[in-house]
Amino acid sequence: MAGRYPPQWLDELRQRADIVSVIGSYVQLKKNGHRYSGLCPFHNETAPSFSVDSQKQFYYCFGCKASGSVIQFVMDIEHLSFPEAVEHLAEQLHLPLPEMQNDPAYEKRRSLKERIYLANKAAARLYHQYLWQKEGEEILQYLKKRGLSDGVIRRFGIGAAPPRPDIGKKLMEDGFTKEELLSAGLMMERDGRSFDMFRNRAMFPIIDAYGNVLGFGGRAMGDAMPKYLNTSDTPAFNKRYNVFAANLLRKARGLERVILVEGYMDVVALSQYGVEGVAATLGTALTPEQARLLSRYAPEVHIAYDGDKAGQKAILRGLEVLEAANVPVKVLDFPGGLDPDEFIRQEGVEAFHALKPISGVYYRMLREKEKHDMSTEEGRTAYAKACADFLKNVREPVDLENYLKRLSLESGFDREVLLQQIGAAPAKPSPALPKQESFRQKAKKVAQVDWTGRTLLAVLATGKLPPGSVTPEDFDDPVLKSLCKDLLSGESPASLMEQQPDEQGRSAIGDILSVNTDMDDDGLMHMARDCLKKMRRTRLENELETLQKSMASLPQEEQVRSMQRALELTRLISEQK
């Protein structure tokens, strides 16, 4: 994972990104020497088992076994890939990425991006202030009629763009240039004149997962068009890569699903009723990038678009995008053509939670059925043929059987005929994409480990042992042998954690860095000698046990040699005690 970044640059990033400061922004930590403890953010607990070591720049949970460097923590807490976590930390620390360090235009682009963030944040405050003033009275009344409380308005930072241009003027008085405001999409130019982009609209700030105001969605009052006006793409904002309410998704913990809706008002309304994990696209159809973004926050996405014809068409497109991105997806099908906002206001939150999500295949079958006259043989035949195309992609035999039963009942065709129409017998299940295990699941899978070998490597990692005290040949476990070679070559444990290709290697390093090595040089040397003695004794005992089990089946001449070796092993074992 770390191959695309120079090791020296990654070391500088780790040194700048102090792990205590980074984790402390997510977890309340209590200092105890050079260690800090707190409640683990990765599993529910009442007694703190989460430890952060400021010297080793490493965290470890004794409960769920979560462990790693500052980069690993950001990956796990923010649901990011390694490159994304590295870039996130680098941006927070104003550390140019390696490929950017020799780019003379990089600093200019970064500076403009930060100015846009500041301008948008300042604009969001002005819009929100206007909402509570006389200029925003009409828009405030509109929001109230939609059932929004003061609390939820403030939670989302909803504001009002005044009918007369004013925002651009105030922002320029605060030090922003016209060019910066044009770049941010807060102003526009036409025929040599510049003016505010948003006027007489309810304003919804678009905030990313890290609290940056990327842009705005403006809902027009009256019959003004377009009904919704969104900030165009800017140097700080691309609609394809973001969703509305990403900041709230990031704060939510333990989400079982993300609910994807069409409009900003749907997100706000569901949030007011206590529904967590709701997001919306930004005035465009769902993109593959947005699908992958949503999959970071929950294992499944529920599409909850409007129940009208346009919404149904958008659901079918959304299913294709999410399935293509291998994101598990279901549909919330609202009756009567209602949208989520209307449904929850009319029926209440209990009715919303009572809606049963349906699979994408079943949803397609429902919509297909509406296209045909099921009272005629031609209609039933066309329906059966269309559904057979959907069912070709079903890989689970049990699911396929359920769909076939329903289709047979609705169309009148026998199961065997429908199977023939599909093209073959049910396909064998394809290998499922590996699901990201929870830390609790990982902890349960941790087998009995060689703690003696791990303890020896922990002492070696301190760098305080004399050269030659420990060698790779002291280890039988290939993972520990490889880690020993890396440590002897000068690799840091933090960098090794990020280089491991599998969970076995990460788990081993986590165990190593969790060992307490707070002692003087003599104590560390004594610990190393004890470990080496025990490892050698264990190796001899294993050889003796194997020899004793096989001795009876050996020819007499080999039995004599084996007996001599057994006596020698017994002597060597006694010397190790």
Image: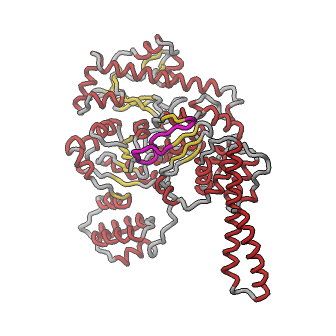
Residue 143 screen position, x and y as percent: 26, 29
Where's residue 196, x and y in %? 42, 19
Q: Is residue 145 found left or right of 73 in the rendered image?
A: left
Residue 88 seen: no
| Residue 391, magenta (yes or no) | no
Q: Position of residue 92 (x, y in %)?
A: 56, 30
Pick whichever, 315 or 108, lies toward us. 108
Residue farthest along the left direction in this orientation: 346
**Quarter in which the C terminus is drawn:** bottom right
Residue at (25%, 45%) from the top-left corner? 338
Asked whether 26 or 345 is in front, the reply is 26
Report whether 451 appears left or right of 240.
right
Against 416, residue 154 (above or below) is above
Q: What colour-coding does the image apply? A: secondary structure
* 295 and 11: which is toward the camera: 11
The residue that appears at 42% across and 65% down in the rendered structure is: 389
Looking at the rendering, the stretch of residues picked out in magenta corresponds to 33-50
- Tell which of 169 and 440 is nearer to you: 440
- 376 above or below 352? below
Q: Which quarter of the figure has residue 121?
A: top left
Instruction: Give the residue furthest to the bottom.
Output: 556
Question: Picture coordinates of residue 542 (x, y %)?
Answer: 67, 70
Can residue 416 be seen at all in this image of the molecule? yes
Query: In the displayed structure, would residue 364 be above or below residue 265?
Result: below
Residue 537 higher or lower than 36, as above or below: below
* Residue 360 picture quarter: bottom left
Q: Tally the marks.
A: 0
Secondary structure mostly seen in the magenta stretch: loop
| Residue at 45% across, 15% down | 171
